[in-house]
């Protein structure tokens, strides 16, 4: 999972045209699609669940990595549902469970890659204790798209990369655009979530390509 990939977040897509919006970025070269799951408890909004994952799996088959970001309380209760829906990566928040190690094991038992996310105010100790396939550094506070990139994030990304080593995917999420993409890549990120910087633009395909070029140019 070490290549640089831009993962468009469908949180900022037009849900009435979800298939077309995803098809647009896939045709532009996206191999990852980021699915933001919010439960109204861990974060205030409620968004989508496994039925959206299974619909995208059905529509796009193996052409895309379905990257599921669970912003939900006690994610251990939902691992089976997201795995059965066809998730390729399930990332949960360290702050949302007392059982990070067990949740990683449960995800892997399904043959799915396991990720742990940390909010901007959360220290990185979980990555000293639990081996993951993907480490997600939130570069905004979770819950909403379109927020500005937190400027202290690059130093945290560098510390995360040092902790998890070179072979673990290091994802960043929040405020990523063509300006911040090179900064996070230079800090050690290789999976870049971009929501509003793709789907809120008049030409999402062009916006995707611009961010991808900026990120890969910095590698
Ligand atoms: O997890 C998220 C919010 O909690 C989203 O993935 C993230 O905010 C993407 O949106 P944008 O690129 O517009 O910041
Ligand atoms: Fe996300």
Image (cartoon, rainbow, N blue to C red):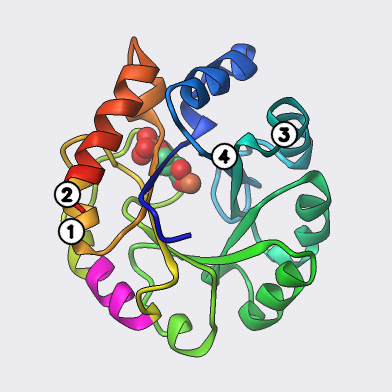
The residue at the point 18 percent across, 68 percent down is 155
C-alpha separation, residue under disc 3 versus residue under disc 4: 29 Å
Q: Is mark 4 within 8 Å of ligand 1?
A: no
Is any part of residue 70 visible from this angle?
Answer: yes
**Dot in front, 3 or 4:** 3
If you read the primary sequence from the N terminus, does the residue marked by circle 3 or circle 4 appear first? Answer: 4
Nearer mark to the viewer, of 2 and 4: 2
Distance between the alpha carbons at the discs numbered 2 and 1? 6 Å
> Of residues 95 and 193, which is closer to you in this image?
193
Left or right relative to 44: residue 50: right
Q: Position of residue 164 (x, y in %)?
A: 39, 79
Q: Which residue is mark 4?
A: 45
Please report whichever mark, 4 or 1, sits nearer to the chain's N-terminal start. Answer: 4
Count of numbered badges drawn on the protein:
4
Estimate how packed mark 4 is, as few (under 14), some (14 to 19) or many (20 or more) residues with alpha carbons within 10 Å: some
Give the residue at mark 1. 186
Q: Earlier in the sequence, mark 2 or mark 3?
A: 3
Q: Is residue 166 left or right of residue 135?
A: left
Q: Which residues are magenta?
A: 156-163
Q: CA distance from mark 2 to mark 4?
A: 34 Å
């Amino acid at each position: 999972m070490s290549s640089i990939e831009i993962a468009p977040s469908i949180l900022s897509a037009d849900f009435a045209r979800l298939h077309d919006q995803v098809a647009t970025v896939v045709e532009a070269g996206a191999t990852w699609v980021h699915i933001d799951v919010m439960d109204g408890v861990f974060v205030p909004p409620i968004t989508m669940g496994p039925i959206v994952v299974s619909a995208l799996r059905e529509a796009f088959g193996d052409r895309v990595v379905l990257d599921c970001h669970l912003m939900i309380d006690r994610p251990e209760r939902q691992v089976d549902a997201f795995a059965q829906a066809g998730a390729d990566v399930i990332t949960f928040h360290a702050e949302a469970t007392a059982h990070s190690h067990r949740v990683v094991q449960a995800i892997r038992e399904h043959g799915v890659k396991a990720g742990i996310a940390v909010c901007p105010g959360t220290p990185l100790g979980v990555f000293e204790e639990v081996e993951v396939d993907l480490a997600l550094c939130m570069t905004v506070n979770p819950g909403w798209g379109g927020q500005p990139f937190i400027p202290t994030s690059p130093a945290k990304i560098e510390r995360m990369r040092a902790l998890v080593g070179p072979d673990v995917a290091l994802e960043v999420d929040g405020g990523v655009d063509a300006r911040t993409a090179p900064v996070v890549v230079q800090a050690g990120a290789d999976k870049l979530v971009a929501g509003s910087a793709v789907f809120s633009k008049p030409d999402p395909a062009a916006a995707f390509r611009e961010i991808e070029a900026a990120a890969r140019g910095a590698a």
